[in-house]
């Protein structure tokens, strides 16, 4: 562990760091990247795992490690911008220790999915900007140019790329596999002399495939979330610099690549649908990239389209969709290590600052370099995407010691902010109901670093310390994490309550069942994805476990008697965790053999409904409803002379019957054929 005060600009407190992490730094330098580089090389020669407290000069240290033949584990941690460069820098020793401890953890990476791009590019535009971009890309790639509207483009001396005209375009797919539909496609006339002119358009729609789409129309993008669709680029055609940057990016997109599999899916606990009935649609409603589609009883997530925003995992009530970069267990371990190490070093009133690796890191660095830096009690916590911060993450943060949570969101993250805001509102409602400060978590979507600096310092000063809950071990099961966190927070709550009412759509609650109307058909138990509603083998009994209920509504839609209602709430008593008997009856015994096969209420209901049905014209036929399946068949064979016989076959109606006026509208007319 090598740390540096960066020529005295970042105050170091080795004693507090040692108190926090339980060991002394191996070397405290002042210029590791220059004058003391030899000390770094001395450690590199040992090939032991090495952690250096500097991010800025990481390329230099990596190059030095390669030159020296270092084969060990080399890591870096930013204690300068995130702790030392601050007006609270002298008091940031505990935070430095926490950042170092987090950096020492081994966090597994996500699985990867292969991506192959052959460099086939479709350029779409209206003028010379698209034409010039197509010609530049055509020097290295396979390019087709599509022009829209009244394109005014000078005819080229040499046609480097195929040029067409179109009226409308639609696309599906992703990098390496776009499926494009083009209306009224027309090829360029070879005789174009001054401006490009086109042949008559094809009357039908044309389909084409490509690996990359460059959209330079400057209008409505082809995709709903263009910045989240890899392989699709739509820079402003009026901004030459943006177009030039995109061209550089496109040229590199040829070959075989790997992209992370951001989320994992477990269909067994998905609450989307059962038996053709739709229940939960949270992930479908909140995926901005369109990567999720219904499939059978569950959903399908296309890993090639998924942009890793994490919104689906954040709103999933069961954990069927879980974020894998990293998995929940690793994320909670990092969070617990950061917060508990901070407290071990004497840190007080820790505020967790969730941020991503692009906008968030840049904003933190800008605030540190040009403004007041981060307050000593604001602990930056990097995540791949803020959308992955679900209710389980926010509540666990409070259990692990955070008295507040700030989510530093990029202003462009408008698609995910609605779902994230709902999650934060639910978290704050629960915390306020238990007597914790209401401003437990909030979003900071601020692009101005000066304003963000003010908000950070105001938020750090406003937090109020509270009781500490007993921390639980990090695990991957979302529902279990929620139950553990809620139980821990309720146990030490300033104002403990047995029940908290929640709004419709909350993922907690009970079911209200009209037991008089319930026939114990148990259809609800077959559709419940979380086994909250469950039956009892070999006995007509309906049970319910409230902590497992996610209020998906599948039971309400499935119940044939329509006697089930949802009641959102959060119950902390033992009744929520224990199995509750909703209704039970003595089994109904077959009137012929005595075998139990149904319930009395079910048989009575079915008999009443079938009494006027043509299949049961007499009491003997109705009595068969009170028999088990085997006895019903035996009785039919014994009592009916021909059990397969049907009634009198009606005389067919012919055209002559209508012409002679023999057909009347009176159903009681016996002369009616």
Image (cartoon, helix red, strand yellow):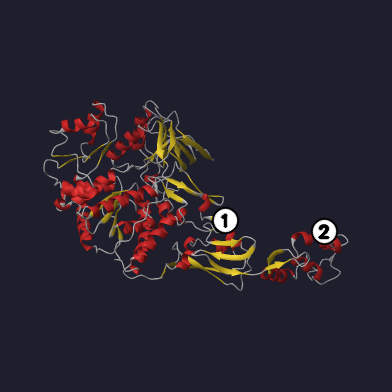
In the rendered image, residue 145, in percent from the top left (x then y), is placed at 41, 34
- CA gap, disc 2 and disc 1: 48 Å
Q: What residue is shown with label 2?
A: 655
Answer whether residue 363 is visible to the viewer in this image.
no
In the rendered image, residue 655, in percent from the top left (x then y), is placed at 82, 59
In the rendered image, residue 537, in percent from the top left (x then y), is placed at 62, 60
Quarter location, residue 226: top left
Secondary element under disc 1, as helix, strand or loop, is strand
Q: Residue furthest front?
A: 22
Residue plotted at (47% across, 62% down): 547
Secondary element under disc 2, as helix, strand or loop, is helix
The residue lying toward the viewer, choosing from 536 and 506, is 536
Viewport quadrant of the C terminus: bottom right
Viewport quadrant of the N terminus: top left
Q: What residue is shown with label 1?
A: 274
Residue plotted at (15% across, 50% down): 89
Asked if the residue under mark 1 is in contact with the one under mark 2, i.e. CB atoms within 8 Å, the reply is no
User: Upstream in the sequence, badge 2 or badge 1?
Assistant: 1
585 vs 512, left or right, is: right
Q: Residue furthest right?
A: 641
């Amino acid at each position: 562990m090598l740390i540096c005060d960066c020529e005295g600009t970042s105050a170091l407190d080795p004693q507090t760091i040692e108190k926090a992490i339980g060991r002394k730094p191996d070397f405290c330098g002042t210029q590791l990247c220059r004058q003391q580089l030899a000390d770094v090389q001395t450690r590199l020669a040992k090939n032991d795992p090495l952690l250096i407290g500097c991010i800025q000069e990481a390329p230099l240290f990596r190059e030095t490690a390669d030159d020296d033949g270092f084969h060990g584990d080399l890591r870096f941690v930013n204690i300068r911008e995130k702790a030392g460069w601050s007006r609270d820098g002298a008091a940031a020793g505990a935070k430095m220790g926490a950042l170092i401890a987090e950096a020492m953890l081994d966090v597994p990476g996500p699985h990867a999915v292969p991506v192959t791009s052959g460099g086939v590019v479709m350029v779409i535009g209206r003028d010379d900007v698209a034409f010039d971009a197509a010609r530049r890309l055509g020097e290295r790639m396979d390019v087709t140019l599509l022009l829209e509207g009244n394109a005014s483009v000078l005819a080229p001396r040499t046609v480097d790329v195929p040029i067409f005209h179109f009226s409308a375009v639609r696309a599906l797919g992703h990098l390496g596999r776009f499926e494009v539909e083009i209306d009224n496609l027309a090829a360029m006339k070879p005789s174009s002399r001054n401006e490009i002119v086109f042949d008559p358009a094809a009357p039908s729609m044309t389909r084409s495939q490509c690996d990359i789409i460059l959209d330079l129309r400057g209008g409505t993008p082809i995709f709903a979330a263009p910045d989240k669709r890899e392989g699709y680029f739509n820079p402003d055609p009026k901004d030459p610099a943006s177009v030039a940057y995109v061209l550089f990016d496109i040229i590199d997109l040829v070959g075989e690549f790997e992209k992370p599999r951001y989320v994992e899916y477990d269909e067994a606990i998905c609450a989307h649908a059962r038996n053709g009935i739709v229940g939960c649609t949270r992930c479908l409603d909140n995926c901005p990239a369109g990567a999720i589609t219904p499939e059978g009883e569950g959903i399908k997530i296309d890993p090639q389209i998924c942009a890793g925003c994490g919104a689906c995992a954040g709103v999933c009530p069961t954990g069927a969709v879980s974020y894998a970069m990293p998995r929940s267990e690793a994320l909670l371990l990092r969070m617990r290590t950061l917060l508990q190490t901070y407290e071990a070093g004497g840190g007080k009133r820790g505020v967790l600052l969730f941020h991503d690796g692009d906008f968030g890191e840049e904003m933190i660095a800008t605030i540190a370099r040009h403004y007041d830096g981060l307050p000593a009690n604001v602990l930056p916590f990097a995540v791949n995407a803020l959308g992955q911060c679900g209710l389980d993450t926010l509540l666990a943060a409070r259990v692990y010691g955070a008295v507040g949570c700030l989510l530093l969101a990029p202003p462009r993250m408008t698609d995910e902010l609605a779902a994230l805001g709902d999650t934060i509102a639910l978290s704050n409602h629960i915390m306020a109901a238990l007597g914790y400060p209401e401003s437990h978590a909030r979003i900071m979507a601020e692009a101005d670093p000066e304003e963000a600096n003010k908000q950070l310092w105001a938020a750090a000063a406003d937090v109020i310390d509270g009781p500490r809950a007993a921390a639980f071990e990090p695990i991957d099961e979302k529902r279990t994490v929620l139950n553990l966190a809620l139980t821990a927070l309720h146990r030490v709550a300033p104002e403990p309550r047995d029940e908290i009412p929640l709004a419709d759509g909350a993922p907690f609650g009970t079911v209200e069942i009209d037991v008089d109307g319930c026939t114990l058909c148990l259809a609800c138990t077959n559709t419940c994805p979380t086994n909250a509603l469950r039956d009892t083998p070999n006995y007509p009994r309906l049970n319910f476990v409230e902590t497992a209920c996610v209020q998906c509504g599948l039971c309400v839609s499935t119940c044939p008697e329509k006697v089930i209602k949802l009641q959102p709430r959060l119950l902390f008593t033992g009744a929520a965790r224990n199995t509750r008997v909703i209704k039970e009856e003595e089994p109904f015994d077959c009137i012929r053999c005595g075998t139990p096969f149904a319930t009395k209420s079910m048989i009575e209901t079915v008999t009443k409904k079938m009494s006027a049905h043509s299949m049961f014209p007499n009491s003997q036929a109705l009595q068969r409803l009170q028999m088990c399946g085997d006895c019903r068949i035996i009785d039919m064979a014994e009592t009916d002379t021909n059990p397969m016989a049907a009634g009198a076959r009606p005389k067919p109606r012919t055209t002559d019957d209508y012409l002679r006026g023999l057909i009347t509208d009176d159903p009681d007319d016996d002369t009616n054929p």
